[in-house]
């Protein structure tokens, strides 16, 4: 029980530390427009999910370190730091149970937070499923591709909607106003959303972003939205063989007031000027190996065995004693 209390308390400390770092540093170090959209998506998600992945990585490294020391029969971490801490994070010698009420409050707080995030995610999935059912009921299969529907609707509709599995919807009115070449480009863009499961990731991002203040949350989500749309623009450009044609299709679709239900993704609703400028650039950034994510996670794993681990122990013992 003592190990559970200590683990929950250290998760809380690491989460708060990462949360503060995101609020302070993300506005200064957010992803650059000179990066490939896929790299920007990875970088932005490292920032967004930092309060969740950082505790897991650092605590795992701390436990692995304690088991390795015991396996190699070296001086045990508990005995090395006995004079500094009362309770230690060690899987070999579990710490005694805390008497402080805070030792039970922190796990309850973390459990409530995770429950809130899961509830938000389940609500988004339920709404998407219900709306898809209603739309398909009033639709006919579209010849443009799989999971594509033509909705009997007088307003303009062109979007991708779903959770794990997504569907593409075009209204009959929208199809009648767009020429076939532009329509194929728009469908290629929406098909990229479907193949990348962007609706699922969009729901996940919005649910986990609820832990941040509104200003930081909007910065994170806007950065993700732009990178996601640019990645699909490049997908469509590769499909048709011309980035200029994709830019024209976005401009043409933006002339209509397209309906976009909550949780859906559409080609001409977000960051249009930035996307047009990106498509008209002479040189598109190349996608490189994920060095930055590997560096961040590797550094957190290494530091979890030493400085951050000891710092968190000091903070936890100060809180609970």
Image (spheres, grey):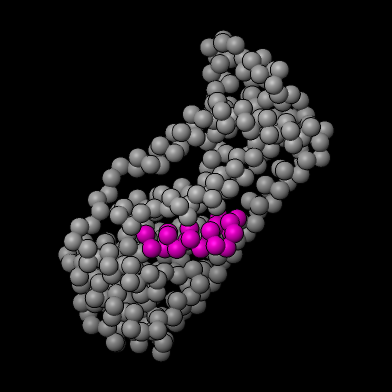
Report if residue 200 is visible in the image. no
Residue depicted at x 70% and y 17%: 82
Q: Is residue 255 above or below residue 41?
A: below
Quadrant of image for the N terminus: top right
Q: Is residue 55 left or right of residue 44?
A: right
Question: Residue 119 at what x, y percent from top left?
Answer: 62, 59
Q: Is residue 276 magenta?
A: no
Q: Is residue 149 left or right of residue 251?
A: right
Residue depicted at x 55% and y 22%: 65
Counting labels gives: 0
Question: Residue 208 at what x, y percent from top left?
Answer: 55, 55
Question: Residue 39 at what x, y percent from top left?
Answer: 35, 50
Q: Is residue 278 left or right of residue 257?
A: left
In the rendered image, which quarter is residue 75 located in?
top right
Please state the extent of the stretch shown in magenta in the rendering: 208-227
In the rendered image, which quarter is residue 306 located in?
top right
| Towards the viewer: 41 or 30 | 30
| Towards the viewer: 86 or 178 | 86
Q: Is residue 195 above or below residue 80?
A: below
Report if residue 171 is visible in the image. yes
Secondary structure of the magenta portion, mostly?
A: helix
Residue depicted at x 69% and y 52%: 112
| Towards the viewer: 177 or 90 | 90
Question: Residue 142 at what x, y percent from top left?
Answer: 32, 76
């Amino acid at each position: 029980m003592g190990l559970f209390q200590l683990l929950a308390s250290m998760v809380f400390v690491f989460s708060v530390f990462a949360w503060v770092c995101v609020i302070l540093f993300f506005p200064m170090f957010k992803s650059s427009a000179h990066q490939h959209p896929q790299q920007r998506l990875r970088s932005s998600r490292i920032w967004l999910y930092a309060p969740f992945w950082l505790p897991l990585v650092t605590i795992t490294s701390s436990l692995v370190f304690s088991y390795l020391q015991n396996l190699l029969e070296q001086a045990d971490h508990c005995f090395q730091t006995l004079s500094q801490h009362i309770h230690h994070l060690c899987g070999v010698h579990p710490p005694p149970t805390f008497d402080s009420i805070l030792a039970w409050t922190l796990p309850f707080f973390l459990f409530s937070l995770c429950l809130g995030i899961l509830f938000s995610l389940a609500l988004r999935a339920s709404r998407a499923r219900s709306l898809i059912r209603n739309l398909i009921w009033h639709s006919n299969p579209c010849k443009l591709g799989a999971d594509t529907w033509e909705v009997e609707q007088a307003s303009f509709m062109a979007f991708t909607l779903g959770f794990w599995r997504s569907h593409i919807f075009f209204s009959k009115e929208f199809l009648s106003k767009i020429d076939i070449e532009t329509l194929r480009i728009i469908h290629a863009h929406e098909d990229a959303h479907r193949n990348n499961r962007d609706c699922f990731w969009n729901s996940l991002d919005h649910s986990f972003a609820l832990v941040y203040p509104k200003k930081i949350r909007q910065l994170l989500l806007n950065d993700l939205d732009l990178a996601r749309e640019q990645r699909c623009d490049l997908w469509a450009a590769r499909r048709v063989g011309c980035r200029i044609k994709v830019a024209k299709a976005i401009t043409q679709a933006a002339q209509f007031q397209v309906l976009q239900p909550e949780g859906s993704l559409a080609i001409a609703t977000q960051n249009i000027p930035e996307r047009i400028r990106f498509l008209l650039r002479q040189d598109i950034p190349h996608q490189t190996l994920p060095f930055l994510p590997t560096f961040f996670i590797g550094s957190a794993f290494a530091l979890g065995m030493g400085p951050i681990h000891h710092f968190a122990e000091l903070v936890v013992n100060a809180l609970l004693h």
